[in-house]
Image: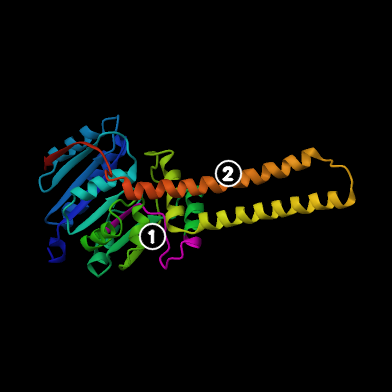
């Protein structure tokens, strides 16, 4: 075994009602075949199926690694849950698995690891088999973020300890890890594979949309441009209303078209409330970043020695 493969590696796996996929996922021996020392951290995000027992059964069959189960106190979503796993990880390199389905050749994990050893602090891996909403998000993000590295759909990634420390130095409470990894200033790389099918993304239904909205506000100027656009529309509507009023006054004609005036006023108020909604969203995100000290809530941590 080479010196490179003697590095200690941690694998952090997001688990939420993953019973059907988790057993096969844990049975892959790619880490055991390539590393002398490694650990597996399964973050059980308040699953109500048999996921926890599947991890326990897998641990009893392993003899060369440490398996931990991090149990959240309530369902918190993938970002907060994975932070709990990252805080527990002690590896020189950390693998993050956001999904437990496998639509790739496990050997690509070692390709990502080798890229890290070559000097890349963040190496991501993903497939192009994603939904239209996901493609739309990445298109908007990359167009308006102004960063040199494009954000792409990812199935898993590997981060060096220096990369993790850099991200935590940037933000002690990262709301969207992928964006910070791509903007941390360290060397990054992306490996793409031809997936065998669309990976399982049922672990959250509403949260990805909330995460996407927060990310667009934090890391792009879309919200700013939208605010400016609505402000200009309000100014044009207001200016048009003034011209209309002056024209009626000069001509001396009686005021008619009550419906038209109310429509204009309604449009103006609609734009005003839209701007207020964007401002409120900004303030909400800022408050979370500044005042939300508790990043996640745990129920227990189980150490299972394989």
Quadrant hosting residue 92: bottom left
Number of numbered discs:
2
Query: Which of the two residues, 31 or 196, is positioned nearer the viewer here?
Result: 31
* Left or right of residue 11, residue 155 in this image: right
**Residue at x-position 16% and y-position 52%:** 32
Disc 1: CA contacts within 10 A as few (<14), some (14-19) or many (>=20)? some
The tag earlier along the polypeptide, 2 or 1, is 1
Query: Which of the two residues, 31 or 266, is positioned nearer the viewer here?
Result: 266
Q: Reply yes or no: does residue 257 show up in magenta.
A: no
Question: Which region shows up in magenta?
Answer: 142-158
Residue under label 2, please give it.
273
Query: Which of the two residues, 299 or 108, is positioned nearer the viewer here?
Result: 299
Residue under label 1, please give it.
192
Q: Reply yes or no: does residue 157 show up in magenta.
A: yes
* Prevailing secondary structure of the magenta residues: loop
Q: Where is residue 94 in the image (x, y as percent from the top left)?
A: 23, 55
**Residue at x-position 80% and y-position 51%:** 244
Rendered position, 205 above or below 133: above
């Amino acid at each position: 075994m080479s010196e490179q493969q003697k590095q200690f590696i941690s694998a952090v796996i997001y688990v939420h009602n993953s019973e059907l996929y988790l057993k096969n996922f844990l049975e892959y021996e790619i880490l055991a075949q390539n590393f002398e020392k490694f650990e597996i951290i399964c973050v059980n995000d308040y699953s109500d199926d048999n996921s926890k027992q599947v991890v326990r059964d897998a641990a009893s069959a392993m003899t060369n690694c440490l398996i931990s189960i991090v149990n959240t106190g309530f369902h918190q979503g993938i970002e907060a849950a994975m932070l709990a796993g990252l805080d527990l990880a002690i590896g020189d390199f950390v693998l993050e698995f956001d999904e437990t389905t496998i639509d790739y050749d496990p050997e690509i994990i070692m390709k990502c690891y080798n890229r890290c050893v070559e000097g890349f602090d963040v190496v991501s891996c993903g497939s192009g088999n994603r939904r239209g909403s996901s493609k739309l998000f990445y298109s908007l993000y990359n167009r308006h973020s102004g960063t040199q590295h494009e954000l792409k759909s990812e199935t898993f990634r590997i981060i060096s300890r220096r990369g993790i420390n850099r991200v935590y130095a940037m933000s002690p409470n990262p709301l969207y890890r992928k964006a910070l990894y791509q903007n941390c200033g360290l060397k990054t790389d992306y490996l793409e594979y031809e997936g065998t099918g669309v990976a399982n993304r049922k672990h959250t239904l509403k949260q990805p949309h909330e995460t996407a909205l927060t990310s667009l506000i934090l890391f792009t100027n879309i919200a700013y441009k939208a605010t400016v656009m609505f402000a200009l529309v309000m100014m044009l509507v207001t200016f048009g209303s003034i011209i209309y009023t002056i024209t009626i006054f000069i001509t001396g004609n009686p005021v008619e078209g009550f419906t038209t005036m109310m429509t204009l006023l309604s449009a103006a108020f609609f734009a005003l409330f839209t701007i207020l909604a964007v401002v409120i969203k900004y303030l909400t995100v800022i408050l979370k970043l500044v005042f939300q000290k508790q990043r996640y809530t745990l129920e227990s941590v189980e150490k299972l020695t394989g």
